[in-house]
Amino acid sequence: MLPMSFPFFSKLRHHKEHLRLIKNEMQRVRAKIASQATDFQPHVREYMTHLCMGRGKMIRPGLVLLTAAATGGIKEEHISFAALLEMLHMASLVHDDVLDKADTRRDRPTPNALWGNELAVLLGDTLLAQAMVLGTRIGDLRFNQRMALATRDLCEGEVEQSTRLWDVAMTRAEYYEIIRKKTATLFAMAMSGAAMLQGMQEEMVEHLNRMGTLLGISYQIYDDCLDLLGVDAQAGKTLGTDAQKGKLTLPIFFLMESDNEDIAAEVHDAVKNRSGFNLQRLRQTESFHTALRLSANEALELNEEAREVLWRLPESPAREALAETTYRLDEMLQECCNGIFIHS
């Protein structure tokens, strides 16, 4: 099959028009997540109710539902699976916020800001465990093995990132592998898992797994750019923590490779000496904006590659919506580099 693109698709990124197909099902996913708190004893239920009422972007559930709709239709198992993935993601965010000492997430105080680090870590663990309980109620052994491996990859990626802070010897390939695990794993599982629950052939499952991986890596690159560029109030969460903690991201790599030798040396030395970055000053330089642009270009290429997978699916509104999801990410990357903040 020759590579093709979707230039003829309507541009429906604004106002989440491409998600109208699954609006009702997304509400069912939110209700499924909220209902999980009832499984706990009263002294735990209050905390879990707070966590399970969070209003996130629901990107991973959206991918589950659109993939299901594009491959035969949304089943009850897909609703539970979408809830499971969002809960895993939520649990990882609880832990991230503890590590990053973040005070806000989705315009709300983080669990660690409300209840302290120790309880926040325990609640994140509890939420992850409940997601696993939900997973036992859907799919077969093969599906559950794949889900367990994805969860392990997610945790392993977080550990690897935390142990490679300020590591000037880290390569770009290692950076890509870390974000594949910590972010792209759940994107890939969303699409491949939806296909598995649909009974699709293994070849199609792997194609969709690859598409999800590409989109997940691209989204993390966007998030890495936003962390360097963003303003907390506009993004709805605490920003700038990744750079100041010493996480090496793609724009940091480009800054260390800048044609401006002074900027390259400054950033390299900041990593080597663990001294932190002067982001306010760096943001005023051409090198900074070049690094964002080069990072975005790599992510845009990944999105284009991801779109090619969609030609393997039958034409349908859901397939078009999946394509529009990738175009939406294109737009977010482009606008981020122009200093405009978009909420997906």
Image (tube, rainbow, N blue to C red):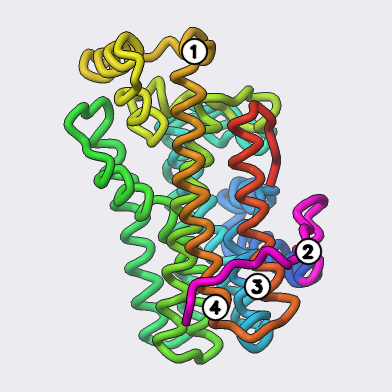
The Cα–Cα distance between marks 2 and 4, rounded to whole angstroms, is 25 Å
Q: Secondary structure at mark 2?
A: loop
Nearer to me, 328 or 63 = 328
| Label 3 vs label 1, nearer the camera | 1
Callout 4 secondary element:
helix
Pointer 1 local density, CA inside 10 Å: few below 14, some 14–19, many at least 20: few
What numbered label is drawn on residue 194?
Answer: 4
**Is there a contact, CB below 8 Å, between mark 1 and mark 4?**
no
User: SS for tag 3?
Assistant: helix
Spatial CA span between label 4 and label 3: 7 Å
Q: Earlier in the sequence, mark 1 or mark 4?
A: 4
Q: Which residues are magenta?
A: 1-21
User: In the rendering, which numbered label is found on residue 10?
Assistant: 2
Which residue was labeled with disc 1?
285
Q: Is residue 44 visible?
A: yes
Q: Inspect the magenta stretch and tell me whether residue 6 lies in it.
A: yes
Magenta region includes residue 226: no
Residue at the (47%, 82%) spot, across then down: 1
